[in-house]
Amino acid sequence: MKRKSILAVLIALVVCLCSASLAWGDSLQVGGVAGGWEMNGKTGTYVTKAEKKIFNKATAKLSGVTYKPVVVLASQTVAGMNYAYFCKATTVTAKPKVSWKVVVVGKDLEGKASILAINNFNYKKISTLKKAKSTSGMSGAWEVNAKKLTSKGIPAAAKKAINKAKKKYKKVSLTPLALLSSQVVSGTNYRFLCSGKAKGSSDVGLYAVDVYKDLKGNAKIKSCKLINIDKYVKY
């Protein structure tokens, strides 16, 4: 009898563990293989030859991490010029880790370039402004890059989603600069870095934009927030 009782208890424990395992698995899946946000590793580049030359001079002696500049977010006239490069950073390790960084570079009047700061750009928690003093939300004589840019290096599916979504979005005219991350749900969420102009304004701002594409291919902008660039250009 004791053996039968022990066996019954063991069977009950196995059933409970299997049930718990299934419940946990179900919680991670919503209409497909779901999970957390994943950073996109594909990027284009909007950096001019002159800007790339300055960046290469400043970062020549760095080791352990490689930086690919995607776009100059903003510039600042000082005794020379400062530039804020939005970059994809990849560690030079057996298992490379990828992240987004803002590398602030200063070029003096003699043409010497140096790194002033390397600031983390956490795509999961982007610093934004609820109410900006100006459309660009800048201070300290920094100016947002106002060049006419077109989308580069963004995966076709993501580009199609934001192009479809922004047709119905009238608050800001948006140009996607980089796909920051994506998330599989019952469909797909995309998080973009965009430049844009708010309706009725001539000022260019930088925006964190979330787009949702459902399983039928319909897409809409869930969130469009002005990025607090001041936080990322500190040095």
Image (cartoon, rainbow, N blue to C red):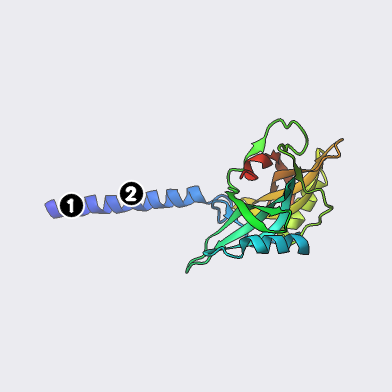
Q: Residue furthest left?
A: 2
Whether residue 92 sits left or right of residue 1 in the image: it is right
The image quarter in which residue 61 lies = bottom right
Q: Position of residue 19 (x, y in %)?
A: 38, 50
Tell me the element at label 1: helix
Secondary element at image label 2: helix
Residue 217 in view, yes or no: no
Q: Nearer the viewer, residue 95 or 31?
A: 95
Position above or below: 169 against 154: above
The CA span between labels 2 and 1 is: 15 Å
Q: Is residue 42 above or below residue 80?
A: below
Residue at screen point 76% across, 56% down:
160
The residue furthest front is 110
Would residue 206 appear left or right of 8 to someone viewing this image? right
| Residue density around tag 1, few if under 14, some if 14–19, many if 20 or more, within 10 Å | few
Residue type marked 1? Ile
For the residues labelled 2 and 1, say whether their Cβ atoms are less than 8 Å apart: no
Front residue of this view, candidates 131 and 12: 131
Mark 1 = which residue? 6
Q: Amino acid at mark 2?
A: Cys
**Residue at coordinates 70% horizontally, 53% vertically from top-left?**
108
Which of the image's four quarters has the C terminus? top right
Tell me if I can see residue 118 in this picture.
Answer: yes
Residue ID at (59%, 59%): 89
Across and down, in percent, residue 109 comes to 74, 54
Please name the residue shown 70% across and 45% down the image. Answer: 209
Badge 2 local density, few (<14 within 10 Å), some, or many (20+)?
Answer: few
Label number found at residue 98? none
Foreground of the two, 178 or 232:
232
Q: Which residue is mark 2?
A: 16
